[in-house]
Image: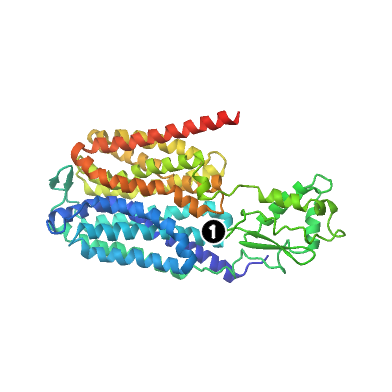
Amino acid sequence: MMFTRDSKRAEMCTIIGAHLVMAPVSFGWMYGNFSPYLNSYFRNHCYPKCLDGDSQWILNLYLGFLGVGLLVFDFLKRYVGLKWTYILSIVLYNGPFFLSAWTVQESVIATCVLLGLFGGFAAGVSMNVGFSYINLWNPKNIAVYVVTVTAIAPTLGVVQNQCVGAFVNPRNLKPNAEYGPMVLFSQPEILDKVPKVIFLLGGLTLALQLIGLVLVSSSTSSSPTQSTPQTSKLNTPSRLHSVLLEDESFCGGNKCKVNDASRLLDKETSDTNSNAVKLYNSNGSSIRQKSDFFSSDDKTTPGTATTEDLSCSQPFNSETLNSDLDQNCEALASETELKQRQYKPSEAVRTPKFWTFWLYAVSISLGMELNYSYYKQFGLLYIPNDQLLTALGSFIPVVVCASRFLFAFLVQSGILNFMNGLIISLPLNCITCAFWYFAPAYSEVVYIVLILVMAFSHSFIYVVLCTGTLLEFGSEHFSSNFSVVYTGVFLTQFVAVFYLTAMLNAFGYFWVFILASFLSVLSISFMFFTEICLKERGK
């Protein structure tokens, strides 16, 4: 099929826009660098009137409600449509974000609600919006785009971290006030800029999202992935006849049998990048294929046809098509339908793999939350160099992006699989959290290396959870299954917020870090135990 210039441009613009919609997800990558300034502002500028809560809630609410946004996305998309869901996510994120420039001067609780609750919810919706646009326009390459789309947030985090450091503390002033386990800034030239930098960060995110909104298109009517009966290479009886019966190289020189025909149909149809490819039989009725990872209405397995669509009630003309295919039409339909089981969330939660993913999400998300919150706040106790730690915060997303692309390439090449991601990241998270407390006291270099290795161990989480959910539970209920798996992150953040500050004040950083290490041990133990049990059952 010849693609029109407009359709190519529309697809390219939508793919770019789907990446830009992920801008709110960068908040987590920026917050660790921003939080010492924010805590300093609460303690030294607006105290005591604004200090009515714990600022730890900001990040925990953000990461927790990101999971809520993922869960609610399907509901919003069904009732208002994809484009309006995108617009709603822009309003829900940027409105509260700009308003927080005022609430930081008045209330910690209000700031937590605006930046954490609203920000996290909108970021979760935005994440699924991005995935949906990719799947709508290029479902064939969605596995690749999962990596590139999730890499946008840490990439933007690099820019945001540099903007925060250069704007708030350009002279690299050292923290000069101690509050319990924290060291903070009290210099007015730093504190006065905190509300202003919120406007700077909000403006950057809003600009990217608005550009994405202009670029995306929900209609694929002009998409190159569409095919019509006049142009599809598998749309006529004669073409189907020649594919199935005349390609002796595929059939080994013999008459094509049902299994061969099924595989060849998959091979031929997979070459069209369509969401709705139509095949026409000799009587004019259609055989449909669908592929929508995020559609709850789609009851078929992507890349397969349903028994209804491959009905034998109107068989192909026997003079045109070999009788073997005529007689075995029902068998072909059954075979293609059952290629991969499509798990509903209620079925997925009853499998050991689900709980492996869930515990992995729990342990890694806690490590991520501690890294986001404390890599700079804890590092300032031993390394009073704000610009160095800002640079470290900017380099963390670079490591994350590079490792995600490397992991995706190794998986695509068949060298690794998504389970290898669990086996690599969990032990690394366990080791780095266990030695985190001692690293900055030893040397700056050791601390930087440890934080970067920890970030490397966390970088697989979205790729592993997305790919694992897709491969293990099928694509029909992908967004729902992924959202249920992500509840591990949601619950971890809500539980952590109740004990982190109290535990930190009572026992110090050491035991906070050790707890994250222990959770990784628990996840590793469960993973190997279930694998051993499954192998024994297989025997």
At x 56% / y 49%, what residue is drawn?
Answer: 474
Indicate the secondary structure of the residue bearing disc 1: loop
Residue 291 or residue 140, whichever sits in front: 291
At x 38% / y 33%, what residue is drawn?
Answer: 521
Q: Position of residue 213 (x, y in %)?
A: 44, 68
Q: Position of residue 414 (x, y in %)?
A: 57, 40
Q: Position of residue 477 (x, y in %)?
A: 53, 53
What color scheme is it?
rainbow
At x 45% / y 64%, what residue is drawn?
Answer: 76
Question: The N terminus lies in which quarter of the figure?
Answer: bottom right
Left/right placement of residue 116 relative to residue 107 reads right
Answer whether residue 432 is visible to the viewer in this image: no
Residue 439 or residue 79, whichever sits in front: 79
Image-quadrant location for residue 91: bottom left
Left/right placement of residue 417 relative to residue 485 reads right
Residue 296 or residue 421, whichever sits in front: 296
Q: Residue furthest right?
A: 319
When the figure is inspected, residue 191 is found, relative to residue 338, above or below; the finding is: below
Answer whether residue 361 is visible to the viewer in this image: yes
When the figure is inspected, residue 176 is found, relative to residue 274, above or below; the finding is: above
When the figure is inspected, residue 404 is found, relative to residue 434, above or below; the finding is: below
The amino acid marked with disc number 1 is: Ser
The crowding category of the residue bearing disc 1, from other C-alpha atoms within 10 Å (few below 14, some 14 to 19, many at least 20), is some
Question: The C terminus lies in which quarter of the figure?
Answer: top right
Left/right placement of residue 508 relative to residue 144 reads left
Left/right placement of residue 87 relative to residue 162 reads right
Q: Position of residue 356 (x, y in %)?
A: 46, 39
Residue placed under numbered mark 1 in the picture: 296
The count of marks equals 1
At x 31% / y 33%, what residue is drawn?
Answer: 434
